[in-house]
């Protein structure tokens, strides 16, 4: 079967990478934070991060294979088991923070689907404010998703895959409707195209703010670890894969650039996005609602009809994003933790953690994960009263936590290149000097972007609360991973292994 397996040509490879990396919501977020200037940052991230990092992942994946091959194996072969465990644990922790963030955000598209706009800031339960109520709902979501996943109910993922199609169709809707608005308004842009590196968002107008935005540009190219497994499925990988990476970078960057420009056709930043109720959680729905309104207004519909059209645009976006979030959750609730407990030495974990139920799920480990996520959600939601600040800090926490594990893989890459006795069917970096140069550049860019993001609020005089939230997760999980591995090392030493 494997011998006759059809391999991907260049076009199929580019499409596979595009669908794995490109995210509809990244363009609205970029426009909200940096306006047209985000195009420059996305281009820079493609050249300085996406292309070199993707080629590194391709080398890892093509050289270190096997059923359980992945981040732990790559790091263990390159550096050692302790470094591999800490790096893999940090990768797992990034999904914990993602679940904290997304389980709270999922209620934005849910309420938008029914009400036509984000209603999470109006929710209340007993004497709790909206942020605390959303926190309880997020915990309820975690419990439901964990319970369903433990039962091995996979058919629901087929339903939620419709959300992926809906979100994909939003790109076509944006292009088509923006074109109609541009023609109807005789080429007029709602947001003037000038001072491209001057952000309309006051929080991103300083040099520190500009550098802090870089982490959003890096996050827009996330998910590259999956590329390592694509090398063996590609025709003539030594030539096709580098071409595929470069073409994908061009296609994705152009896609983001066109999307950001299209948002400028319909969305005036001061008129639409400056409200205190607009945040990183609901920005896509606010802008899609405005897109529908601007369409109605440009073709001569009444104000009331244009408003209604905007609400239906928001509802469609909400439904698609809700189903998409749900589909991602039903995969990520078990996939990372299953990879962690089964892809690392079993002796590290209590026996209950590695036990699989009849559905093949590590149910004890998953309920422990659920409890941990719920605890962080409750601490965050009851520690913040401002709902916009709550969603903004959740997004920043997710961005930082999702990009930090890249540092482990990048740091290990020169050591991987020197590892002997590896079959290397795909080699992108042929000289040690060039490997070191690229590694240092990419490492410094990711580290610098995260440092500026973490310390931007404190440097700009907004206090240390946001900074503490962003570093608490990485520091806490780093300490936990070290303690877990030290316990394992002591047990192995005592057993004479």
Image (cartoon, rainbow, N blue to C red):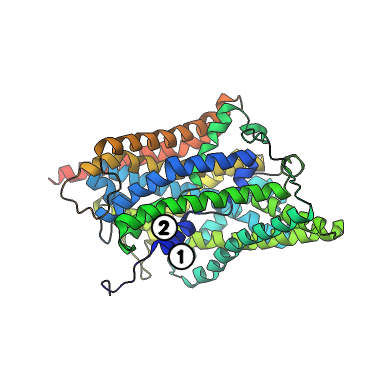
Across and down, in percent, residue 248 comes to 46, 54
Which residue position is annotated with label 2?
366
Q: Is residue 79 visible?
A: no
How far apart are the alpha carbons under marks 1 and 2? 9 Å
Q: Position of residue 43 (x, y in %)?
A: 51, 42
**Residue 380 percent coordinates (x, y):** 56, 42
Q: Which mark is residue 281?
A: none
The residue drawn where x is 51% and y is 47% is 220
| First in sequence: mark 1 vs mark 2 | 1
The crowd level at tag 2 (other Cα within 10 Å; few <14, some 14-19, many 20+) is many
- Residue at 72% across, 47% down: 267
Q: Are marks 1 and 2 in contact (CB under 8 Å)?
A: yes
Quarter of the image for the N terminus: give it: bottom left
Residue lying farthest to the right in this orientation: 302
Q: Is residue 201 above or below residue 71?
A: above
Q: Which residue is the site of mark 1?
A: 149
């Amino acid at each position: 079967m494997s011998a006759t397996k059809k391999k991907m040509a260049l076009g199929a490879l580019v499409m596979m990478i595009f669908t794995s990396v490109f995210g509809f919501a990244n363009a609205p977020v970029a426009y909200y934070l940096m306006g047209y200037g985000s195009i420059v940052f996305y281009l820079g991230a493609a050249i300085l991060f996406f292309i070199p990092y993707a080629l590194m992942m391709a080398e890892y994946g093509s050289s270190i294979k096997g059923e359980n091959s992945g981040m732990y194996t790559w790091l263990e072969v390159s550096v050692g088991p302790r470094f591999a465990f800490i790096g893999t644990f940090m990768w797992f922790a990034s999904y914990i923070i993602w679940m904290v963030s997304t389980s709270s955000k999922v209620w934005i598209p849910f309420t938008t689907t029914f009400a036509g706009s984000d209603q999470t800031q109006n929710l209340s339960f007993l004497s709790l404010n909206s942020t605390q109520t959303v926190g309880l709902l997020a915990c309820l979501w975690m419990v439901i998703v964990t319970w369903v996943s433990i039962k091995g109910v996979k058919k629901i993922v087929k339903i939620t895959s419709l959300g992926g199609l809906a979100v994909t169709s939003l790109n076509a809707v944006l292009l088509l409707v923006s074109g109609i608005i541009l023609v109807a308004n005789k080429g007029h842009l709602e947001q003037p195209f000038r001072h491209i590196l001057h952000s309309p968002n006051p929080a991103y107008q300083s040099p520190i703010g500009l550098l802090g935005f870089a982490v959003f540009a890096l996050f827009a190219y996330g998910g590259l670890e999956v590329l390592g497994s694509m090398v063996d499925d590609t025709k003539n990988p030594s030539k096709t894969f580098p071409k595929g990476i470069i073409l994908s970078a061009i296609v994705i960057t152009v896609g983001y650039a066109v999307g950001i420009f299209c948002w400028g056709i319909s969305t005036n930043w001061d008129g639409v996005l400056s409200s205190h109720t607009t945040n990183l959680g609901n920005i896509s729905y606010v802008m899609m609602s405005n897109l529908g309104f601007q369409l109605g207004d440009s073709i001569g519909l009444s104000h009331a009809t244009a408003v209604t059209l905007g609400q239906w645009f928001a509802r469609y976006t909400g439904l698609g994003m809700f189903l998409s979030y749900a589909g991602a959750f039903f995969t990520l609730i078990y996939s990372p933790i299953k990879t962690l407990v089964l892809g690392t030495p079993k002796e590290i974990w209590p026996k209950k953690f590695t036990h699989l139920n009849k559905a093949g799920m590590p149910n004890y480990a998953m309920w422990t994960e659920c409890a941990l996520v719920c605890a962080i959600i409750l601490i965050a939601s009851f520690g913040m009263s401002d709902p916009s600040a709550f969603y903004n800090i959740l997004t920043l926490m997710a961005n930082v936590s999702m990009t930090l594990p890249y540092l482990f893989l990048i740091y290990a890459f020169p050591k991987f290149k020197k590892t002997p006795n590896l079959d290397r069917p795909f080699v992108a970096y042929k000289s040690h000097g060039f490997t070191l140069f690229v590694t240092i550049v990419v490492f410094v860019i990711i580290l610098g972007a995260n440092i500026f993001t973490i310390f931007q609020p404190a440097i700009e005089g907004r206090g240390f609360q946001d900074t503490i939230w962003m570093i608490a997760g990485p520091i806490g999980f780093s300490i936990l991973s070290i303690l877990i591995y030290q316990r394992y090392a002591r047990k192995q030493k005592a057993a004479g292994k």
